[in-house]
Amino acid sequence: MRRIIILDDDKNFGLILARFLKKNDWHVSYTETSKLFYNKLKKDDYSIALIDLHLKEETGLDIIKVLKKDYPQISCLILTAFASVETAVEAMKTGAEDYITKPYNDDDLLIKLDHIHKNRLQHEELKDLKKKFKLWLSFDDYIGKSKKIINIKNECKRIMNTKSVISIYGETGTGKEIISRAIHYESEFREKPFVIVNCATLQQNLLASELFGHEKGAYTGAYNRKFGKFEVAEDGTIFLDEIGELSLDLQKTLLRVLQEKEFERIG
């Protein structure tokens, strides 16, 4: 869906930009005020929003904060005549994927928009693949109708959108990985990574490096920086299977990481 909505209180600029994008196979809606902008969003679906940084009513960054909360599926770009490193950093922190300077370069604008559009298509394809190969699980995949199973599902639904540490107990084959996947993919973090670490299959002397990563030269054979599983799972979920197989020293380190919510790479 190549649909763009523009919010810019400079009507001449906004209409010229809209015509240019329409000529390049984009479906475009132009709005001059935030009120019209929000009304359009309620009526139609858009994949990208181009938003002017300096508006009369509020800033473009304020608009992006609303979009990230209420319309997270829309990719945002800031339009600004005051481009600077500080502007770019602030826009990215707020949730913008990029920014466009005024006056814009035709090729630069189209390249950025095409890049975002391709990334969205790839993301949708990945979602379809996950569903097709059952990597994307729900609580319906945890089969059972007993009172205990229903209580487990209800408890998981209650806590799934929290950033809590969840302990899952059960004998081998009782579905600990299935329920952990369901918690992740039913939650608001479903678009973020889900990383599995089987603590029983990794060498004890390499576990710390696997979990927390290492810097180049941290030890013999560490030729490059390596990101650990915790870093790979940032903002998502890490499932530590067979955690009881870890050494006591590593369990203490892991407990501190889970409590403090921070860690350091080795070296």
Image: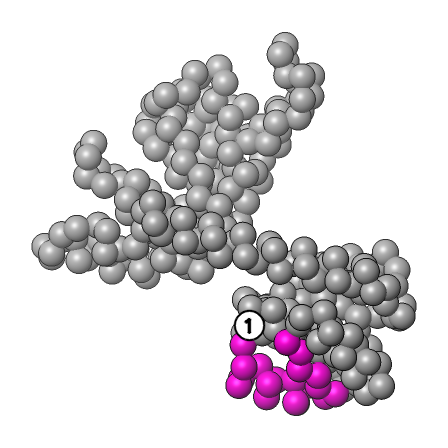
**Quick one: 80 or 200, which is closer to the camera?**
80
Query: Residue 167: horizontal and vertical position, in percent?
Result: 33, 42
Task: Report whether residue 260 is seen.
Answer: no
Query: Residue 66: horizontal and vertical position, in percent?
Result: 61, 75
Up-down relation of residue 165 to residue 93 (above or below): above
Q: Quadrant of residue 174?
A: top left
Residue type at tag 1: Tyr
Q: Residue furthest top?
A: 220
Task: Report whether residue 139 is seen.
Answer: yes
- Pointer 1 residue: 71
Task: Name the residue located 81 percent from the left edge and 60 percent from the top edge.
Answer: 107
Report the magenta residues as a range: 27-45
**Quick one: 235 or 190, which is closer to the camera?**
190
Up-down relation of residue 148 to residue 59 (above or below): above
Query: Residue 10: horizontal and vertical position, in percent?
Result: 83, 84
Task: Name the residue located 54 percent from the left edge and 52 percent from the top edge.
Answer: 122
**Quick one: 232 or 256, which is closer to the camera?**
232
From the image, which quarter does the N terminus lie in? Answer: bottom right
Task: Name the residue located 34 percent from the left edge and 33 percent from the top edge.
Answer: 241
Q: Is residue 33 left or right of residue 13?
A: left
Query: Residue 146: horizontal and vertical position, in percent?
Result: 10, 55
Residue 43 among magenta residues: yes
Residue 48 among magenta residues: no
Kind of element beneath mark 1: loop
